[in-house]
Image: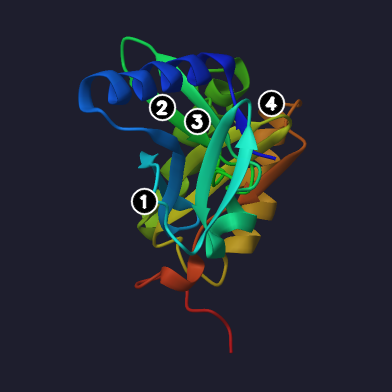
Amino acid sequence: MIEITEFAKKRIEVLMQDQHDNHNKEISGLRLTMNGRVPDVEYALSFVEKGKEEAGDISVETNGITVFMELKNGKFLEDVKIDFVQTLQQTGFKVENPKVVPVKTAAPETPPKLDTPEAMAVQKVLDTEINPGVASHGGHISLIDVKDDVAYVQLGGGCQGCGMASVTLQQGVITAIQKAVPSIKNVMDVTDHAGGTNPYYSPGK
């Protein structure tokens, strides 16, 4: 059922009286129309003068106000709420429709926390033990994130697409990181190895 708040009703009655007193018009109700497609629906309200009702409209009475709608929109508009708002940003009638569900916006990803003691310890291992060695192959390993007990690393340069990358991780990177930072239980490689263009080692056939 259509709902008209008390505040909106009072505002509508004031405007209807104004139409009568200043424009000599008898108002029979309010016409609610809609344009656009879900979820980008726009609503419009207008007064219906007595004797000028649209033949194809349907009407309902709510809170003492008659609301007219196009027949084709009746089911879609049957549960709307009409309110009147006055704020610094907006003044006017507001139509809320429970049938129009706002599109949910994905929550922003949590930014990497590379300033934690664990992250800084892992970065130190990469800088002092790992990267000097892989640099001779034209490669480097970057710390992307540390979440809980997992360190996420990315291989670049000659290490990206390298057929020996998994060996390098297992025998070098993971061992060195876990030895220096015992709280790290796993090291995940998030490298797009398929995008490597010039690996130092060619993958085995």
Crowding at mark 1 (Cα within 10 Å: few <14, some 14-19, many 20+): few
Residue at image position (49%, 20%) is 8
Q: Nearer the viewer, residue 134 or 80?
A: 80
**The residue positioned farthest toward the bottom in the image shown:** 205
Residue at image position (57%, 67%) is 164
Crowding at mark 2 (Cα within 10 Å: few <14, some 14-19, many 20+): some
Can you identify the residue that label 1 sits on? 52
Q: Earlier in the sequence, mark 4 or mark 2?
A: 2
Across and down, in percent, residue 199 comes to 41, 70
Across and down, in percent, residue 27 comes to 39, 34
Please identify, in this view, whether the residue under mark 1 or under mark 2 is nearer the observer: 1
Can you identify the residue that label 3 sits on? 111
Q: Are marks 1 and 3 in contact (CB under 8 Å)?
A: no
Checking the image for residue 187, the label placed there is none
Q: Is residue 154 left or right of residue 63?
A: left
Residue 105 seen in this snapshot = no
Say which amino acid is labelled 3. Answer: Pro
Q: Earlier in the sequence, mark 1 or mark 3?
A: 1
